[in-house]
Image (spheres, helix red, strand yellow):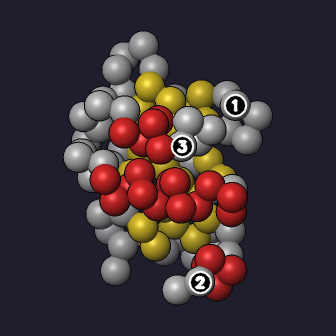
Amino acid sequence: MRNEELGDLEVWIDQDLCTGDGICAQYAPEVFELDIDGLAYVKSADDELLQEKGATAPVPLTLLTEVKDSAKECPGDCIHVRRVTDRVEVYGPDAE
């Protein structure tokens, strides 16, 4: 599947499953950050840490590979990337 076929994507982290080892923040520090509690969270487009449960952040097309790799490599299987239009997960533990 080519990137342009996916449409706009958003990412969220299930903190209940987060192991806090920070692989996501290493791959895409523009999108992910570890907080003082040791868990990873997504960041808004203006770099604000989004700590609400289920908070989503847009996935910039320029960072799609890094976000996709984060979801793939995450030991907690807690990173979910889905299409904004129909909320279907395209990368992550629930992707088809």
Residue 92 position in % (x across, y down): 36, 63
Task: Read off the residue under disc 1.
Answer: 47
Seen from the viewer's position, the closer of residues 83 and 27 is 27
Query: Cβ–Cβ below 8 Å for labels 2 and 3?
Result: no
Q: Which one is earlier in the sequence, the residue at label 2 or at label 3?
A: 2
Instruction: Name the quadrant of the C terminus.
Output: bottom left
Crowd tier of the residue under label 2, counting other residues whose Cα lies within 10 Å: few below 14, some 14–19, many 20 or above: few
Q: With respect to residue 15, does 71 lie above or below?
A: below
Question: Could you tell me which residue is drawn at 59 percent across and 83 percent down?
Answer: 2
Say if residue 96 shows up in the picture: yes
Task: Read off the residue under disc 3.
Answer: 28
Residue 43 position in % (x across, y down): 61, 36
Query: Cβ–Cβ below 8 Å for labels 3 and 1?
Result: no
Amino acid type at circle 1 is: Asp
Q: With respect to residue 6, does 63 lie above or below?
A: above
Which-is-in-front pick, marks 1 and 2? 2
Q: Give the spatial CA distance, label 2 vs label 3.
A: 20 Å
Which-is-in-front pick, marks 3 and 1? 3
Checking the image for residue 2, the label placed there is: 2
Q: Residue furthest right?
A: 46
Q: Secondary structure at mark 3?
A: loop
Amino acid type at circle 3 is: Ala
Q: Secondary structure at mark 2?
A: loop
Q: With respect to residue 58, does 3 lie above or below?
A: below
Number of numbered labels in the structure image: 3
Q: Give the spatial CA distance, label 1 vs label 2.
A: 27 Å
Question: Could you tell me which residue is drawn at 68 percent across and 62 percent down?
Answer: 61
Crowd tier of the residue under label 1, counting other residues whose Cα lies within 10 Å: few below 14, some 14–19, many 20 or above: few
Q: Secondary structure at mark 1?
A: loop
Q: Which one is earlier in the sequence, the residue at label 1 or at label 2?
A: 2
Q: With respect to residue 7, does 52 lie above or below?
A: above
